Image (cartoon, rainbow, N blue to C red):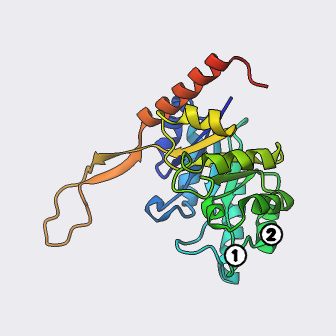
Amino acid sequence: MTTVEICIDDVEGAPLAEACGAHRVEVCAALSDGGTTPSIGLVGQILARVRTLAVSVMIRPRAGDFVYSPAEIDVMCADIAAVRALHAPPGVEVGFVVGALTADGLVDTALLRRLVAACGPAPVTFHRAFDTLPDLPAALEVLIGCGVRRVLTSGGAGSAREGADTLRRLVDTAAGRITVMAGGSVRGDNVADLVARTGVPAVHLRAVELVGGAGTASATAVSYDVGARPVTSARPIRDVVDALAALTEGSGPRS
């Protein structure tokens, strides 16, 4: 079975993803900036609304680069501690998504080890900062050595489909020691081919649609309501889940 993870920034997105057959959500804020740490209130309310869905929480104190100051590192560790203190329903796995680089563009192993330790037994995913690294197979070994459980990657390409050959090599290099999760323009019309070509055991996507704003028109020249907002959408999730189900049925049991 291929795990399906949905990236969300709305509280209603988690129960929707669960109902559509997804296995995990990655909870973020500021997705337009690539994702930052969500509020503790959002994470808490998501945990209160799911029953079996795994929940991974982005830990990224700001947009921009992935080189962090000592004060920002303290913020990251404090955010991890705050999430770990929340109550999760029985059977709901809570994990974390992190990424840290050095100024010369390599994995910051010292900081990564500190973050993994702060997460305790919770599974840790390294986010797509991985795709900026010069030697992805070598970086994969570094992540494994630091105790990272999963890596989100397009294979260093603009989309997972374009990076399929590299994803295949990463899956082979991982040899079950770390989960290679494909992300980058994953959709229902390409996910079956992507999984068949690469052997990735997990895929990641943002499933979003724009809905009209519920606010009233501004009574002055100042307005912050653009008239539409993005929300998690059921259709892209169902398309991916259905395509993977069809792939599994067509290929028989997977070892």
Residue picked out by circle 1? 73
Most extreme residue toward the right is: 145
How far apart are the alpha carbons under marks 2 and 1?
A: 9 Å
Figure quadrant of residue 88: top right
Lower sequence index among marks 2 and 1: 1
Say above or below: 63 vs 244. Answer: below
Q: Residue at x 54, y 49 (%)?
A: 162
Is 84 positioned to the left or the right of 11 in the image? right
The amino acid pointed to by label 2 is: Arg
Tell me where residue 66 appears, x and y as whole percent.
Answer: 62, 73
The amino acid pointed to by label 1 is: Ile
Is 26 positioned to the left or the right of 96 in the image? left
Tell me where residue 177 appears, x and y as whole percent.
Answer: 84, 47
Q: Residue at x 69, y 37 (%)?
A: 199
The crowd level at tag 2 (other Cα within 10 Å; few <14, some 14-19, many 20+) is: few
Residue picked out by circle 2? 114
Q: Residue at x 58, y 45 (%)?
A: 204
Say above or below: 48 vs 107. Answer: above
